Image (cartoon, grey):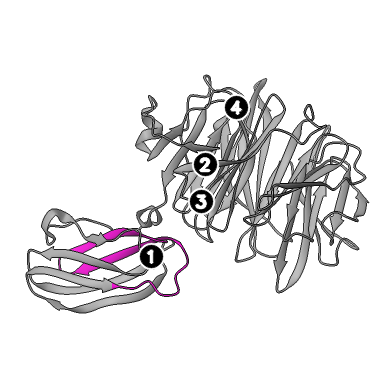
Amino acid sequence: MKFIITFIMMSNLTLLSQGWLQTAELDTVRYRQIISSGESTYLFTYHTREIAILRSTNDGVTWDTLVDGNPKGFEKEFPSVLEVINENIAFVCLGSKGNIFKYNFSDNSIENLKIDATFYIASIKMIDEDNGICGTDSELFITDDGWKTTQKIDVNDLSEVYINYENDKLIYSYLTSDEGLEIVSKYFRSEDKGESWIETDLGEIIGLEMVVKEDNSIFITASKYIIVDEKFEFFDIIIKSTDNGKTWEEMLNKSFDHRVDLDDIKFYNNQIGIACGQNTSTYLTFDGGETWEIQNVEDVEELSLRPTFGGFTQTKFILGIWNKGLFQKEISISSVNWNSTTTNYLNNNSINLYPNPVEKQTTIEFELTQSTNVTMDVYDATGNKLEGLVSKYMTQGNWGITWTPNNLVSGAYFIQMTTDYGTFTQKVIVK
């Protein structure tokens, strides 16, 4: 089954003014996760305890339904988390008795890999089909054979797990958050497959989610609350470590008079990221997580206690809000503080690329209204220069330049033209 997403004009002007568009209005869908793998984006949802997994391979324009309903015999079980390994393999945790289902989308097969868990699996992360980590509130499990066998470790108040490579070495980590008389969160890290752990106290926050960027910096989203004049004050928190979790720096601390839980964070690359949570808390970063811009998703009173989950398609941010819908926003080079001022040296203020998207070759066409020095370069979405196309004096008139995007992976790129009179940036999609 395939769903075609149509654009719906929204009544919320603040969201529209920040570049978001609603692409699906789904009144009964609870989004659990949005995950990217390769050129695909996956939506993990549920309704009345029935799961669904949808996949888009065309930048969120259409969505194919890969899974519609729980495995036979588990119709009434509650879903918790999804982990996508590649285009064909995903692991779904379902129910309170350690059931991990391995889905193979290429042949529509399902395998139940039951582990010795006593309650709901709250978090699962895998680096490939064999190596992974998962946990309940009081148990941690590590596998190197795709959950056929596990190493079990007793823990207290586990909230999140993670696995990543550093210098070809597998690193396992997890968070605990004790919400007793004094709130204390801790970060644990192991470089020897769980035989020993380095422990770091994170202070009086509730650690909820973590991610490790390509540069090995670690980000944790968290919440916090205090009582001031007999009133609760709540906080969205993001902290960062660049020394393997030994020390942490606060990157976001925003207060609210209503409950918030910032429990989702992902990075598109080393520069661009998204963080989301309870009551539609949503933030974007374009500088590697140094600063975070709040997104005014909706009125909180209208959407009380509606979680929001975020992620990416090939060229867009994507949000899923419980029982509200799906939202998308373009990722553009201008988002990372690039000078893309349109000036009158171009006729119609435009650069035309045909074809765009580009598969093998495209022609870049433009008309100069004045003679000028011209440089034209190709950049990726983070502003890294990839190659130069032109650097010469050009006379007034029509011009056409042929570009072959050799060795570029599929995704969004930018042609930036600089002249004596200003700059202009044009997005191009490479298939």
Q: CA distance from mark 1 to mark 4?
A: 41 Å
Q: Which mark is residue 63?
A: 2
Q: Closer to the observer: label 1 or label 4?
A: 1
Q: Which residue is mark 4?
A: 306
Mostly what secondary structure, the magenta segment? strand
Say few, some or many: other residues with alpha carbon within 10 Å of mark 4 (under 14 / 14 to 19 / 20 or more): some
Say few, some or many: other residues with alpha carbon within 10 Å of mark 1 (under 14 / 14 to 19 / 20 or more): some
* Contact? badges 3 and 2 (CB < 8 Å): no
Residue 279 vs residue 248: left or right?
left
Q: CA distance from mark 2 to mark 4?
A: 23 Å
Reply above or below: 277 against 314.
above
Of 380 and 176, the residue lying toward us: 380
Q: Closer to the observer: label 2 or label 4?
A: 2
Amino acid at circle 2 = Trp
Magenta segment range? Answer: 403-431
Helix, strand or loop at disc 1? loop
Sequence-first tag of 3 and 2: 3
- Seen from this angle, which residue lies furthest bottom? 392
- Residue 424 part of the magenta-drawn span: yes
Sequence-first tag of 2 and 4: 2
Q: Pinpoint residue 87: horizontal percent, then vertical percent.
A: 62, 55
Q: Quadrant of the N terminus?
A: top right
Say few, some or many: other residues with alpha carbon within 10 Å of mark 2 (under 14 / 14 to 19 / 20 or more): many
Q: Which residue is mark 1?
A: 359
Give the quarter of the image for residue 191.
bottom right
Helix, strand or loop at disc 4? loop
Q: Residue at 70%, 69% (x, y): give it.
A: 166
Of 229 and 292, the residue lying toward us: 292
Residue 109 vs residue 25: left or right?
right
Q: Which mark is residue 57?
A: 3
Q: Which mark is residue 380?
A: none
